Amino acid sequence: MKAAVVSEFDSAPRYEDFPIPVPAGQDQMLVDVLAAGLHPRVRSQADGSHYTSTGELPLVPGVDGVGRGPDGRLRYFVLPDTTAGAMAEQTVIDTRRSIVLAEGTDPVAVAAAMNPAMSSWVALRQRVSFQPGQDVFVLGATGNAGQMAIQVAKRLGAGQIVAAGRDADRLAALPALGATAIVPLGAADTAERLAKTAADVDVVLDYLWGPPAADAMAAIITSRADRGHPLSWIEIGSVAGPTAAIPSAALRAARLQIVGSGQGSVSTREYLAELGVLAGEIASGAIAVDARPVPLAQVEQAWAATDARHRIVLVP
Ligand SMILES: NC(=O)c1ccc[n+]([C@@H]2O[C@H](COP(=O)([O-])OP(=O)(O)OC[C@H]3O[C@@H](n4cnc5c(N)ncnc54)[C@H](OP(=O)(O)O)[C@@H]3O)[C@@H](O)[C@H]2O)c1
């Protein structure tokens, strides 16, 4: 079969022949892949930098996707750590890590949206006891996952939804998705604007980490009306840096708890519990991402396109 094949971690995958993987055990199934999302998680899998990487090569990247098995049913699947990923004409799935989609569901939309949407969905539903009416601050709201976080927070009943990001055009588009206030990052008055709009939020969904997280934390904590009011800071992504200089006083001066949300801190069982309802939200169009389908044969060009405006989906 044809697949996107990584032979060395410092070059993009290439469209090449790869052996068809073989199901082992009654829960495994060979599926024809219809769509597989090119998420940041997949890029870090393909360059060996993700924390789950074992260094084994060659590998076919792709952590999730939509496919059709011999039973004729359309499924969204999440793969376990494997060297035979979703960016191939066929892959082996574990049916216990899949859900059957209604016939007529757009495979590209689901493959594009599940990974970025799951990041905030699972954070709010599994990592904190989020209640409707609570206020949310999305740090790094201009990427695909951040844009979906605004929609997810709204869908789950958030009150105020403050969105901060760098790209001015995409930031300006966020109120249409549900943001009640927007704050440009890197401006002279960023801290002041955060103090005005986000001081009293209940939950932070942080896609950036690094210096913007430390700066935003200082701005929020020092301006809270009630520092005894709980603030849950959920670390989800680290596009601005793998480490952040959090002052110790931040943890003493306010009722701040910092938790992470991702593979490991959220169990497979907890992820699986959320798949069905989230897929339904996406299939109905209630939560949407701008998906761009690209033929699998053009995987090298897809890899070179890093514009976060769209989520690329490879289509075998
Ligand atoms: N833990 C989880 O469950 C989970 C799930 C999905 C994604 N993630 C992580 O979440 C992060 C975002 O994912 P995504 O799918 O949204 O990626 P994406 O669509 O590629 O968006 C990334 C965004 O990061 C912003 N950015 C990059 N460097 C920045 C910096 N130094 N300061 C401020 N903004 C910066 C860019 O915004 P501008 O265009 O405004 O510059 C870009 O829009 C990634 O780290 C990803 O691995 C985690």
Image (cartoon, grey):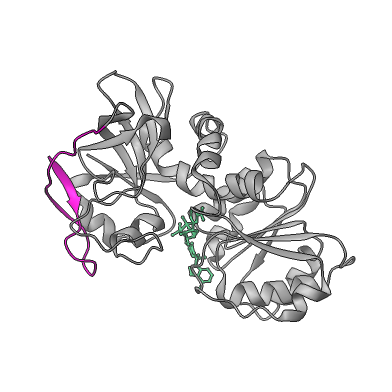
Which SS does the magenta portion mostly show?
loop
From the viewer's side, name the closer residue of 144 and 233.
233
**Residue placed most toward the observer, 155 or 173:** 155
- Toward the front, the furthest residue is 25
User: Of 121 and 181, which appears nearest the observer?
Assistant: 121
Q: Residue at x 28, y 34 (%)?
A: 34
| Rendered view: 111 above or below 146 | above
Which residue corresponds to the image point at 26% horizontal and 30% vertical from the top-left? 31
Q: Quadrant of residue 76?
A: top left
Q: Is residue 49 left or right of residue 269?
A: left
Residue 68 visible in the snapshot:
yes
Magenta region, residue range: 1-24
Give the quadrant of residue 94: top left
Quadrant location of the N terminus? top left
Vertical order, 148 against 276 (above or below): below
Residue occupying the point 57% across, 34% down:
286
Q: Position of residue 43 (x, y in %)?
A: 34, 59
Judge by depth and name the residue closer to the eye, 147 or 51: 51
Q: Which quadrant holds the C terminus?
A: top left
Find residue 33 and report its horizontal and vertical position in percent.
26, 35
Where is residue 120 shown, x and y percent of the image?
A: 59, 49
